Each structure stands twice: as structure tokens, then as C-alpha cells.
């Protein structure tokens, strides 16, 4: 029961003890009232206190002295002993104070007991103003055990922090290293210990781990971040039954050959050229057919759907399929493999298409040509030159066909003004080789893929069979389940189907195409949840993979600058305060850059390369003369 509040006209005390915002306070009464009091606090602040908030009135000592004395008295009290004295029933603080001192308690003793009860919520539950109830024994024991656990954890965290600050990485943190680096759980003591060490040392988590030897290399730091996010269970594949190759496929019409970069191991497209008459060629595009080896919903489908694409980065890749699947379906030289083929009857005079047909077949792979071995043809094909290479006559025919295709579409297959870069990583050594887009061999491959993908996409659209299309309108590229135009390529519809070993979208489309070619019902309807969820997931994952590839290319560009000891580099202005270093796909902000037009060449000082943050500092040195114009860029700008 609350202590009785004496009505204002009978009050003898000049001070009050009251509760406000969960705290016990004291003040001196200035003006009593029926429902509230005007009170002055020990700090001189005047406030109104409701009568229902008052827990005790007293004459002496003063308000400030009472709080100080009661606090000192409360510090001497043992909460556990008070809990034993309290019993299970609800009680008022004055009742417990009376039992504790064995007489009528004075104001300091009463207030001290109140403060102790108020500060021990594990021992005493509040049941009203000035009233409490002792916690049940089992509940108290559990709460005390939790408190002890927290104390021990705090001690352990302090131990971890001290070791980290001293330059030692605690072994207990090793299993959590990646979590602490990339996605720390702030409720864990390990995270709190690392954060405390970072505050004490002024280092980031990555810098701290590098300092204590817990970060093997900057390369591992970046790779492991990506793996932690996208492959938390690792990059291995679960046990599975190897796919069976279809045995009832007819043989292909002609031997086929592929054209890829040296590092390509998932060879999923190839070509064939055969003269069928004096004025006609039959040109075939042949795509590896994993869709003929297993079905949607199978274990292999689940593996591919989880990854959605092969991940590329300089020096390594993470394949979408296990090695045994790739070995069975990749169009490797000397093998016979199932393929989805499309044949075009092409005029030998103007390379116009007279007709086409598609079929499922078994192709014999005659060769895997590599760009590096056939690079001479990039200069010879436009002038009808010869290099004495195998299949160069067939490549010359395909080159002429590609030019005709590009002209009819009215759009270039590749942006010839842009430069690609091949990253070759050999151990710790990196070489970066520019490769200009639009080279004849690149165009040859690109045009044939555009032709196959757009023709097959149109085939499915005409038959109202669902597929996943690439659509471009208004400059924006998106995925769709409807065959809409791709403005950038100048085709009425475009469905990815040429890389089923490397992209899940292509595999899904191949299942749809294979069913249509054999007169069977397609596995996915246009409103299929599987189809729509695949579309959404692919867009997100593919963008993340692409971002990681760009990040690692930037990292290796910085490694190359360090490897070659580059301190001064020529660059090209791309936009305000930004340049691209010549010979590298590396854009850098240069705050000191003068106001120059895009395309202007400059020289910059390179310094402070940071492999963990993937940053560097570039400072403008001078604006270079334009060798073609024979004058400085500043002169050219002034003339404009």
C-alpha cells in the first residue's frame, strides 16, 4: 500500500520524495495543492509534481542531503539479503525498511531502501509507486546466471581486444574471420571486441586484421568478400549422378569448329560451312545441348539455378555446372556432342538468307580455334589475304556473311570504338592486353550469335511458347517473357540461347526450344512462377557477378601499376575531373585536372595505391599535345 499523502492544509513536511520518468527524485515544497505540488529541486529548477507521484514526505534533512545520504545508505545494502527478507507477497518499501532496521525507519533509511529496491529489478518487480514484489527464486537464479554470463563475456571481449591491440589474432576468432570482416553480428562479443580494438588503434577491420596477420592477401580479401556473399556454402557441388547423353540423335550435316579465347573451357557454340551448290552455302550455328541431358526440376537443374551463371574474374572463374557436366556437353575438339543446330541457306553471291531450319543432332567437333592463333586474320580478312591457317576459307565465308548480316540489320554487332582488355594472371604476375572491339573475328562470332538468338526467339514467339527475352527500348535493357524489339541490335526479338553451359537463362530457353522442335509441350508457361522468379533472380545475380568482375579488374589494374613501377602515366579525359589511364580499363578522379574536353590526353602522377580499398591518387602533371593535330590541346580549345 502507498504511504498516505497528507492533504496540503495538514502537511508538516517541507520536502518530498517522488518518482519522475522512472527515476527517484527529491525536492522542496513551495506551494502545496490538492492534486499537485509546486516543488523546487536541489538544482534550483521549479516543477509541478502530481500528488500521485509522491512516495514519501519528510521534514529533514534537506532534499539534496537526503538523496546523497540515501544513496550512500543504499550502497551498503545487500540486494540478495533484502530479497530473502521480503518474502513472496507484495510489500511497500517502508514496510521492508522497518523490518530491516527493526524499528520505525527515519527518512534516510526509508529512502535508502527505496533506492536499493528501485535499482535491483532482477530481485524486485515494481508493483506500483513505492510497492514491490520479490522475484521468484527460479527466475532470479536464471537472471543472475545471465548476468554472470554477460560479465564473463565482457571479460573475454576485453581479452580479445587487448590481444588485437597488441598485434595478436586470437585463435577463437579465426572461424569467424570472414563474418567479422564482411557481415559482423554486433550482438556477438567477438564483434564488440574487434570494434573496440578498431577504436583503440584507429584502424578499419580489414587494416586491423592485416596488422595482426589474419589477412593473407589483399586479393583473398576481395575474393572472399564475394564468396562470403554469393557462395556461403562454398563453390563445390553436391554429389550427383552424371547426366546421360541422348543416344537417338541423328548425325550433323558437317564437321563443326568453335572460335574462342584461350581460357574458354565451356565451349557451347560452334559453326559449320558447307557449299551445297554453286550459288549457295549452308551455314550452321551449333549450340551445346545440356537441356537434352537432364530435365527441369532435376538435381543438376537445381545446381545451375542456384548459381544462374558462370562467374568470371581475372585469373579464375566459378562455373555454373560441375566439371562432369561440362565435359559431357562442351563442344570439345575430337568429340561428338548433342547440339541444337540451326542451318541457314545463304546465297553465295550476296550472302542473303534463302531459308533456314533447326534440329536436334549429334555434331562432330573438328576443332577448337583460338583467337590468339588466328589473330592475323583480323588484318587479312578485310583485304582477302591468306595466312595459310586451317579453316581460314570457311572463316572468310563467315566473315562476308557477318558483314551482310550487319548491313541488313543496320546496327553494328559491337561498338567498334570501344576497347576490351584481356587479363592474363600467372601466379603473382599480371599482363593486360588491349583488344579493340569490332575486329573481324569478333564480329563474325557476334553476328552469328545475334542471328541464331533472334531467329530462335522469333520461332518461339510465333508459336506462343514462353521464353526469356532481352529487350531494349529507350536505351534501357531489361528481361521479359514477351518477344519485344531490341533496338540496339535492330531485331524484332532476341532471346539468349547460345550459352547454355554458362547462363541459366539460355538453358531455360533451350528446354523451351527443344520441346518445340520435337513437338512436345514446353516445360514452362508464360505465367509460370519458375519462369518469372528465374527472370528476377537472374537480373539481380548477373548484375552482382558483373560488378564483382569489374571490381577484380580494377584490383588487377592497380596490381599492374605496382608491378610495373608506374609513377607517371598518360591518360584520356572522359568527363569532368575524371580520366581513363591509357592501356588500362581504369577510370580515376583527378581533382587537380584543369577544365578540359573529353578525349584530351594528359599526363598524371600516380601515387598512394591502396589494394585493400582499391584506390589510388592521380595528380595532373601536364596536358599533352595531340600528335595527329600537331598542336597542343589548349591551342585546339582556344581555336574552338
Image: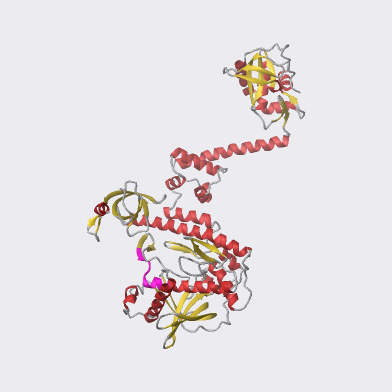
Q: Position of residue 624 (x, y in %)?
A: 26, 54
Between residue 215 and residue 500, name the one nearer to us: 500
In the rendered image, the quadrant that contains the C terminus is bottom left
Q: Position of residue 517 (x, y in %)?
A: 58, 78
Q: Is residue 519 above or below residue 31?
A: below
Q: Is residue 135 above or below residue 495?
A: above
Between residue 345 and residue 498, name the one nearer to us: 345
Q: Is residue 167 above or below residue 317?
A: above
Q: Is residue 437 magenta?
A: yes
Q: Quadrant of residue 483?
A: bottom right
Q: Is residue 11 magenta?
A: no
What residue is rendered at 54% in x and 56% in y?
232
Visual colour scheme:
secondary structure
Q: Position of residue 372 (x, y in %)?
A: 36, 71
Count of numbered circles on the image:
0
Question: Seen in the image, is 98 located left or right of residue 261?
Answer: right
Between residue 506 and residue 168, name the one nearer to us: 506
Span shown in magenta: 433-445
In the rendered image, the quadrant that contains the N terminus is top right
Q: Quadrant of residue 89?
A: top right
Between residue 176 and residue 452, name the one nearer to us: 452
Question: Seen in the image, is 589 located left or right of residue 544?
Answer: left
**Residue 217 visible (yes or no):** no
Amino acid at each position: 500500500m502507498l504511504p498516505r499523502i497528507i492533504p496540503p492544509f495538514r502537511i508538516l513536511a517541507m520536502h518530498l520524495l517522488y518518482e519522475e520518468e522512472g527515476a527517484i527524485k527529491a525536492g522542496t515544497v513551495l506551494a502545496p495543492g490538492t492534486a499537485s505540488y509546486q516543488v523546487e529541486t536541489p538544482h534550483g529548477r521549479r516543477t509541478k509534481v502530481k500528488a500521485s507521484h509522491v512516495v514519501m514526505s519528510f521534514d529533514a534533512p534537506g532534499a539534496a542531503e537526503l538523496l546523497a545520504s540515501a544513496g550512500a545508505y543504499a550502497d551498503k545494502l545487500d540486494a540478495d539479503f533484502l530479497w530473502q527478507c521480503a518474502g513472496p507477497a507484495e510489500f511497500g518499501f517502508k514496510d521492508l525498511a522497518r523490518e530491516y532496521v527493526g524499528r520505525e525507519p527515519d527518512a534516510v533509511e526509508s529512502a535508502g531502501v527505496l533506492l536499493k529496491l528501485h535499482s535491483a529489478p532482477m530481485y524486485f518487480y515494481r508493483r506500483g509507486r513505492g510497492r514491490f514484489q520479490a522475484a521468484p527464486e527460479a527466475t532470479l537464479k536464471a537472471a543472475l546466471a545471465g548476468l554472470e554470463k554477460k560479465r564473463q563475456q565482457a571479460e573475454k571481449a576485453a581479452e580479445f581486444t587487448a590481444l588485437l591491440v597488441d598485434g595478436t589474432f586470437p585463435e577463437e576468432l579465426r572461424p569467424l574471420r570472414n563474418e567479422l570482416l564482411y557481415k559482423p553480428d554486433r550482438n556477438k562479443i567477438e564483434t564488440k571486441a574487434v570494434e573496440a580494438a578498431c577504436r583503440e588503434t584507429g584502424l578499419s577491420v580489414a587494416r586491423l586484421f592485416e596488422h595482426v596477420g589474419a589477412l593473407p592477401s589483399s586479393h583473398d580479401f576481395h575474393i572472399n568478400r564475394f564468396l562470403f556473399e554469393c557462395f556461403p556454402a562454398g563453390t563445390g557441388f553436391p554429389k550427383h549422378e552424371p547426366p546421360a547423353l541422348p543416344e537417338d540423335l541423328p548425325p550433323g550435316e558437317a564437321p563443326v569448329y568453335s572460335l574462342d579465347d584461350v581460357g574458354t573451357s565451356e565451349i557451347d557454340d560452334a559453326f559449320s560451312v558447307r557449299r551445297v551448290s554453286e550459288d549457295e552455302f549452308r551455314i550452321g550455328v551449333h549450340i551445346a545441348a545440356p537441356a537434352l541431358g537432364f530435365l527441369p526440376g532435376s538435381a543438376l537443374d537445381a545446381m545451375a539455378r542456384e548459381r544462374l551463371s558462370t562467374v568470371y574474374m581475372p585469373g579464375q572463374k566459378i562455373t555454373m555446372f560441375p566439371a562432369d557436366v561440362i565435359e559431357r556437353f562442351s563442344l570439345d575438339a575430337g568429340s561428338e556432342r548433342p547440339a541444337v543446330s540451326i542451318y541457314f541457306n545463304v546465297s553465295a553471291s550476296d550472302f542473303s538468307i534463302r531459308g533456314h531450319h533447326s534440329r536436334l543432332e549429334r555434331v562432330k567437333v573438328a576443332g577448337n580455334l583460338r583467337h590468339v592463333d588466328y589473330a592475323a586474320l583480323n588484318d587479312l580478312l578485310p583485304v582477302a589475304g591468306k595466312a595459310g591457317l586451317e579453316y581460314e576459307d570457311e572463316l572468310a565465308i563467315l566473315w562476308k556473311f557477318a558483314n551482310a548480316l550487319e548491313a541488313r540489320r543496320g546496327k553494328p554487332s559491337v561498338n567498334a570504338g570501344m576497347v576490351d582488355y584481356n587479363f592474363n594472371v600467372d601466379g603473382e604476375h599480371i599482363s593486360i592486353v588491349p583488344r579493340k572491339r569490332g575486329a573481324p573475328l569478333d564480329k563474325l562470332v557476334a553476328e552469328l550469335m545475334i542471328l541464331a538468338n533472334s531467329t530462335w526467339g522469333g520461332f518461339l514467339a510465333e508459336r506462343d511458347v514462353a521464353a526469356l527475352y532481352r529487350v531494349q527500348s529507350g536505351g534501357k535493357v531489361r528481361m521479359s517473357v514477351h518477344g519485344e524489339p531490341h533496338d540496339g541490335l535492330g531485331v524484332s526479338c532476341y532471346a539468349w540461347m547460345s550459352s547454355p553451359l554458362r547462363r541459366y537463362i539460355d538453358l531455360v530457353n533451350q528446354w523451351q526450344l527443344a520441346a518445340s522442335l520435337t513437338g512436345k509441350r514446353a516445360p514452362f508457361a508464360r505465367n509460370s512462377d519458375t519462369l518469372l522468379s528465374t527472370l528476377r533472380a537472374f537480373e539481380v545475380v548477373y548484375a552482382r557477378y558483373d560488378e564483382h568482375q569489374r571490381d577484380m579488374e580494377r584490383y588487377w589494374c592497380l596490381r599492374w601499376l605496382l608491378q610495373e613501377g608506374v609513377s607517371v602515366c598518360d591518360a584520356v579525359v572522359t568527363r569532368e575531373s575524371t580520366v581513363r589511364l591509357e592501356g588500362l580499363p581504369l577510370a580515376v578522379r583527378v581533382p587537380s585536372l584543369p577544365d578540359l574536353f573529353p578525349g584530351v590526353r594528359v599526363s598524371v602522377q600516380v601515387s598512394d595505391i591502396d589494394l585493400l580499398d582499391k584506390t589510388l591518387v592521380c595528380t595532373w602533371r601536364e596536358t599533352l599535345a595531340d600528335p595527329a593535330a600537331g598542336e597542343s590541346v589548349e591551342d585546339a580549345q582556344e581555336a574552338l
